[in-house]
Structures are given as structure tokens and as C-alpha cells.
Amino acid sequence: MIIAYLRVSTGKQFLSNQQEEIRRYAENKNLVIDRWVTEVASGSRKGNDRKLGTLLKQMKRGDTLIVTEVSRLSRTLTDIMGIMGLCLEKGINLYTTKEGYSFDNSINSKVLCFAFGLVAEIERNLISLRTREALALRKAEGVALGRKAGSYTKRNILVDNAAQIVRMLRQDKSVADICCHFQVSRDTFAKFRKEHPEVQKALNAKEKRRKNRKKN
């Protein structure tokens, strides 16, 4: 199934431009749109809190989602990465008409997704740097600092989803795919797998399958 997703932030904006853009794209690619999904919602809201989240849950492997541009998915890079990761995991093809991006199961798509992940990581690092500078200033001013007990980290996300990560590795998903899906860096994943033998075992088995395929 091929689905076109249109989003505007307010009811005063028009969807017709996006609709026409996708129609032209579909004609040029000889694609037939099976369903049009329109939504009036702020892009700053997470995908799961919008029609888009429900739509992605309904879509199956081999389905295609077309948007005019990446920013129609979300206004935040980390949320965009989560949506891309979910599409890769479910085998959903994601196309953007203006930028000409194609996210599918190809190597180029995975490289592009990894590049987006790298940009997201840089963005998080810059935010972290500004946070550290602000904390250093507060400390110099005598304000008590410190992580509160029970605070959540990126490592916790991987730990809580260890079983899913093992399944993804058994499905021959790459480490880049997994990092992209959970929005973590390779360093964070490397530390995590060293602490979880079942993940390392699944990773070794995946590598063994890859070598066997090359021999054949």
C-alpha cells in the first residue's frame, strides 16, 4: 500500500500545495496513491501523539509512505530519527518529494539514516555542551548540583529493550539500524553489548551468518 501523509501546523494553512507536489511525484515514479492521510498538528508534537503514530503502527512491510519533506514528520531531529528507525525496522519505504530522499532497505538508505543519526548525535552533544557550561556557571555561583537518584539515561533505553535488540539482530538488522532506531551512539551501544552476553551472542551469530552467505 502507498500512503501519502500531509501535515500543516494550523487550520489556516493549506494542504493543496503538498497534495499537488505528491501527485506530481507519484506520476513521475509511476506510483498510485492508495490512501491520503491529512493532519492539522504542530510538528513539535511527537509522532506517537499524532495521527502519524497510529498510521505507522498500521503499516506493514513493503508499504510506502510519501511526504513532501522530512520536516512534515516532525520538527525535532531526534523524533525524525525515531520515525526513520521504525520505518527501517518494519520494512516501510519512506520517500520525500522535495529533498528526494529514499529510505528503504538499501545500503544507501542505511548510510543516509546513519548520517542523520550522526547529525542528531552532534546536536545532542552541542546541547550537552551548553548544559555543562550552564551547570559549571551555576556551580561557580554556589548552586548544589548532581544527578537525582533514578534518572533515566540512554543506556537504560537499551537495557529496557534488550530482548527487542536481540530480535533485531536475529533479523540481520545492522548496528547502525539499531542505533538509529533507539537514537543512541555507537559508543553507547558498544558499552551496552559488553554488559549483555545475550546481545553479544546475537551479534556474533549475525556476523557468522554474514560470512556463511559470502562463502556461498
Image: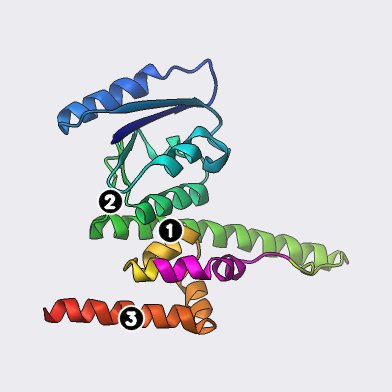
Please state if 123 lies on the left or on the right of 5 as rendered: right
Give residue 12's position: percent from left, percent from top.
Answer: 52, 15
Tell which of 39 and 216 is nearer to you. 216
Q: Is residue 154 magenta?
A: yes
Residue with the mark numbered 1: 117
Stretch in magenta: 151-167
Residue at x 50%, y 64% (from the top left corner): 184
Please state if 120 lies on the left or on the right of 108 as rendered: right
Residue with the mark numbered 2: 104
* Dot 3 amino acid type: Ala
Q: Residue furthest left?
A: 216
Give residue 192's position: percent from left, percent from top.
Answer: 53, 77
Sequence-wise, the earlier of marks 3 and 2 is 2
Q: Is residue 32 magenta?
A: no
Instruction: Please state, as top left, top right, bottom left or bottom right, where the N terminus lies in the image.
Output: top left
* Dot 2 amino acid type: Asp
Residue with the mark numbered 3: 205
Q: Secondary structure at mark 3?
A: helix
60 over 214 or under it: above or below? above
Q: CA distance from mark 3 to mark 2?
A: 24 Å
The answer to whether the residue labelled 2 contacts the one labelled 1, judged by CB atoms less than 8 Å apart, is no
Residue at x 44%, y 17% (from the top left corner): 14
Give residue 35's position: percent from left, percent from top.
Answer: 33, 27
